[in-house]
Image: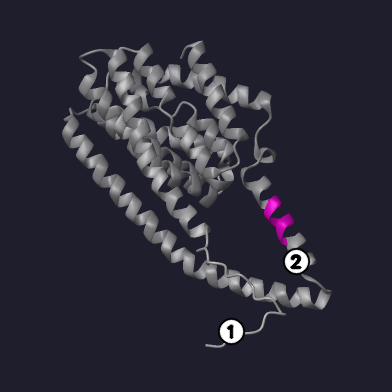
Amino acid sequence: MTLSAVLLVTAVVWAVSVIRSIRLRALVYSLPLPMTLALVSTPYGVGGAQVLGVLGLNLFFVTVAVTHQRLRWPILLADGAGIAVYVALSAGLLAVDIPFEAALAATLVLWLAAMLLLRRRARTRVTPAAAAGEADAAVAGGADAAVGGPGAVGDAGSGAGSDAETSAGGRPDGLPALLKLLVIFVGAILTALLGAVLRGMVVTFPYSGVLVAVEARRQLFEFSGHFARNSLALVGFLTAYHYLQDVSAAVALGTGWAAFAVVAAVLHLPKRRRGAARASPPRRVSRPLRSAAEPPTVR
């Protein structure tokens, strides 16, 4: 791993660490910057194994989330388990020759199945969460009436929301700068040692994912869901690069980034428009008020 790769990993991880929105964190991490660097600095191209490597990226985060949040492993040990799963998957993919079209079809089918599963889980959580929210609001309203005013509840609610935002996505959960640099260099050494095993799978290796998982360790399942959605844009990047890599590396990279931007826009823009439409209530046509001195009109 070169110095430029270490600097790139540092920049991505630092950007993720200062962003509070978990959705935006996942989008920033999804940018194919490490893939671009790997394709430029190594002789490997994009084939069927690399497209399936996007599934390996998702499997990495799922492994870290399960081992850290469910099994209560330390985050760095959970990172190691995620890397081990990715390496094992890479070894299996490199052992066979996978046609690109078959790998692409399998990746799209698995991505669609994952999206349907995530949507189903989100719907099952909405109803209990809404009922609990109404119950909490009723209890809070009664306590507010007993205390004497809506201001107390409003201040407490805003304070709690501020604390939750800071603890969940803010800087207090981040690692110190020196520890970040240490993990970055350890990850770089590990990547160099695994280079002979990974071979072409270094294109999709989670270079910055190790530290990103540390930064988002309290929201790993939510981060994994957002990244799984954004990973379709990575598939678009790799697909465009595959079909143009024999023409020119520069043309393939440019087209790949364009494909990534288009797919990411399709994934995100419609949802924002629907959210904006729901947020703005319908406007009512205002009628001029009748003056008190004006007598009523007799028809």
Q: Where is residue 236 in the image (x, y as percent from the top left)?
A: 30, 33
Percent coordinates x, y for residue 124 in the rendering: 43, 65
Placement of 104 over or under 201, stated as above or below: below
Q: Using the rendered view, name the quadrant where residue 246 is placed.
A: top left
Q: What span is in magenta?
A: 157-163
Q: In this view, does 39 lie to the left or right of 72?
A: left
Residue shown at 55% from the left, 47% from the top: 219
| Residue 259 picture location, percent across and down | 31, 30
Magenta highlight on residue 168:
no
Most common SS among magenta residues: helix
Q: In which quarter of the image is residue 244?
A: top left
In the current view of this chain or complex, which residue is farthest to the bottom?
298
Residue furthest right in the image: 148
Residue 153: image tag: 2
Three-letter amino acid code at disc 1?
Answer: Thr
Residue 155 point in image, percent of width and height: 77, 60
Amino acid found under the numbered disc labelled 2: Val
Mark 2 crowdedness (10 Å alpha carbons): few <14, some 14-19, many ≥20: some
Q: Is 149 positioned to the left or the right of 217 in the image?
A: right
